[in-house]
Amino acid sequence: MIKAKYPVEKFLQLQTPFYYYDMDILRQTLQEVNRQVQKRNYVVHYAVKANANPVLLREIKNAGFGADCVSGGEINAAIKAGFPKEKIVFAGVGKADWEINLALDQDIFCFNVESIPEMEVINQLAAAKNKTASIALRINPNVNAHTHQYITTGLNENKFGINLSDLDTVLDLLPQLKNLKLIGIHAHIGSQITDMTSFQSLCVRINEIQQYFFQRHIMLEHINVGGGLGINYEHPNHFPIPDFENYFNVFSEHLNLQPHQTLHFELGRAIVAHCGSLISKVLYVKQGATKKFVILDAGFTDLIRPALYQAYHRIENLTSDLPEEEYDVVGPICESSDTFAKNYSLNGTRRGDLVALRSAGAYGEIMASQYNLRSLPKAYTSDEISAL
């Protein structure tokens, strides 16, 4: 069993709160993904939106992954980290002109396009540069991912993608857009998906969509099924690496991939979540009218997921072996939503204890803000800490 290692004595020398990345867990996660995809004609693009820490980006690039970007800033970060331009895909429902021009100038692999107006703009900007932009149509498959409503993306009610009912119009228009080249289709149904039947349903829908393209005599080179594989937030020590084998097997067994086609994935959370922890110090233990509060120096400015999604993160007191007590674990922000957990069992906690909020490597550091004029949290890797 791979288990996160916390050099507590060295943590005590650092200003909290900060993010800590266990590079051994990250490397073993990357190795397992590569072990699975090398059996198949699959390509994985790391979803940069999950975590754009430069050290992590370089490690992921060195493992041979591509990059899935949703902004010009992410494209620049991917290029700076050394990701090959021919492995960069650019998604997003609202691409600005400067972002499209940046992607065109960098000759990225593909735009995942989400609407007819976007296709027309990309065609116009590509024509001005005398270039041809490779595109994949992001199709809204209307598949329920059975996850939180804020991170569901594949239903008709969502803002993402081209509805199935609009495909005829899109394909009739494409021949007029001379500076676009259709190379594939793309679908992404949501995030933190742990029910594999959702991915099976996606495969069935893509098979149907493929038949539609075959009937129109359009042969697609690339199929992109997005990402969304969830992790086990409750037991990061027992399940530090997601079940990639089962995940990829779903697509091997249920997706009718043609011999000439390449299957693409855009994984983010599943790659980086478990390697990261938010390390915080206990400021106060407050006895309330009906409960005790552990007040940390980290708040939702550092880790917003619990406030935004009511998300669960395992919390561990790294410096106490006292019997467990029940607390509400909260932050210092002047908002009642600045709560990490309610009625949570922790080893007896005192002022000055160090606490780890686990599985925070995805959508943690990258979503941090400076609300209340707080400083952004610093980040350290296990490689850096060991050198101290």
Image (tube, helix red, strand yellow):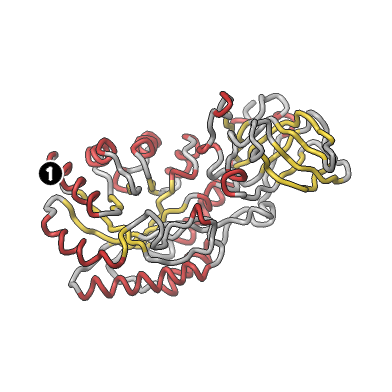
Residue 234 quadrant: bottom right
Residue drawn at the location 14% of the way across and 50% of the way down: 179
Q: How many marks?
A: 1
* Element carrying mark 1: helix
Residue identifier under label 1: 127
Compared across the picture, whether 30 is left or right of 8 comes to left
Compared across the picture, whether 87 is left or right of 177 comes to right
Residue drawn at the location 46% of the way across and 53% of the way down: 267
Compared across the picture, whether 379 is left or right of 76 comes to right
Q: Amino acid at mark 1?
A: Ala
Query: Measured from the top left, where is residue 256 in percent x and y?
Result: 36, 74
Query: Measured from the top left, where is residue 372 in percent x and y?
Result: 58, 26
In which quadrant of the rendered image does the N terminus lie? Answer: bottom right
Residue drawn at the location 45% of the way across and 43% of the way down: 49
Which residue, as the protein is rendered here, is positioned at the far front?
A: 289
In which quadrant of the rendered image does the C terminus lie? Answer: top right
Query: Measured from the top left, where is residue 336 in percent x and y?
Result: 66, 38
Q: Is residue 70 visible?
A: yes
Compared to 384, does 217 lie above or below?
A: below
Query: Measured from the top left, where is residue 81 in percent x and y?
Result: 40, 36
Looking at this view, is 19 or 311 the one in front?
Answer: 311
Looking at this view, is 188 or 342 the one in front?
Answer: 342
Compared to 306, does 160 lie above or below?
A: below
Compared to 190, does 202 lie above or below?
A: below
Looking at this view, is 18 or 38 the one in front?
Answer: 18
Residue 147 quadrant: bottom right
